Amino acid sequence: MAQEKSMAIPEFLSKAELIKQGAEARVYRAEFLGKPTIVKERFPKRYRHPVLDEKLTHRRTVQEVRSILRCRRAGISAPVVYFVDYTSHCIFLEEIAGSSTVRDHIASTRQSDCSKELGWLAERVGQILAKMHDEDVVHGDLTTSNMLLRHQEDGESELFLIDFGLSYISALPEDKGVDLYVLEKAFLSTHPNTETLFERLLKSYAVASKKSSSVIKKLDEVRLRGRKRSMVG
Ligand code: AMP
């Protein structure tokens, strides 16, 4: 849209709908070049030294874009990156319209007593994470809020990964094991009594990933360390 091209980003964002105010970034919904768009704006943190803050913010923006592109190249569903502005630290992303977070989906399905239907979703999550780790992308903030489920007209659902702000590239099984450990902690605290469901997720990860045995071994080590730490504490 011609009007958007000439508009400065702060002016563009002032007209957008703020949907989340986080500690590190604001998330907006807007229309960009005629497309429903999500804009993620990382703002300066006053408590940090300005030079360090600029470096960190720049790095996170670069990492987020790099990981999304790497995932998409490998056929992993993540939003299309429409535009990046490294001055205002804004990423313009495809809005996954008609989607809900996996967190909300699990919560509402469990409430309606259809928990058995969640097995396929746990397997799908295991598979997508296996593919992501096989590409050496470590997400860094895996939670069920950072996964979107788009329900299609044919009844099928497509699973997307979002929020790669803490992601990085690593081939180390330890990094991938910690990634799964972070998810396990978040999963079981957000969705109590879902140990069996999470085990199903891990099983499907183990089957789908080419390098799963060393990752699961590391996950077990990290779990053990976590348990020892909580016993001491
Ligand atoms: P984030 O800070 O990236 O986790 O985004 C915060 C919230 O905005 C998410 O929990 C989603 O509800 C929504 N969101 C983020 N990215 C998208 C997207 N590409 N499409 C649709 N909704 C999104």
Image (cartoon, rainbow, N blue to C red):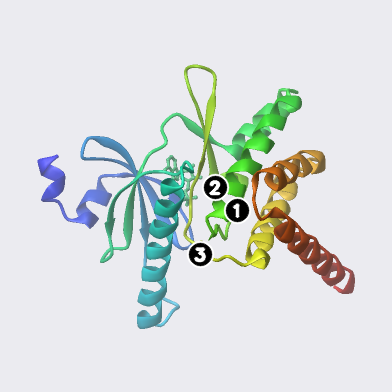
- Residue carrying label 1: 142
Which class describes the residues within 10 Å of circle 1: few (<14), some (14-19), or many (20+)?
A: many
Q: Is the Cβ of the residue at disc 3 closer than 8 Å to that at disc 1?
A: no
Q: Is residue 56 visible?
A: yes
**Residue at 11 percent of width and 43 percent of height:** 3
Q: Residue furthest top?
A: 154
Ligand 1 within 8 Å of the CB at mark 2: yes
**Residue at 36 percent of width and 80 percent of height:** 50
Res. 67 image quadrant: bottom left
Q: Secondary structure at mark 3?
A: strand
Where in the figure is residue 179, as x and y percent of width and height?
64, 59
Q: Is the Cβ of the residue at disc 3 closer than 8 Å to that at disc 2?
A: no
Which quadrant would the C terminus be assigned to in this image? bottom right
Task: Specify whether 65 is left or right of 120.
Answer: left
Three-letter residue code for mark 1: Leu
- Residue carrying label 3: 169
Q: Along the polypeptide, which appears first: circle 3 or circle 2?
A: 2
Three-letter residue code for mark 2: Asn
Question: In whole angstroms, how far apart are the C-alphas of marks 3 and 1?
Answer: 15 Å
Q: Is the Cβ of the residue at disc 2 closer than 8 Å to that at disc 1?
A: yes
Q: Secondary structure at mark 1?
A: loop
Where in the figure is residue 79, as x and y percent of width and height?
41, 43
Where in the figure is residue 188, as x and y percent of width and height?
75, 48
Ligand 1 within 8 Å of the CB at mark 3: no
Which quadrant would the N terminus be assigned to in this image? top left
Q: Which mark is residue 146?
A: 2
Question: In whole angstroms, how far apart are the C-alphas of marks 2 and 1?
Answer: 6 Å
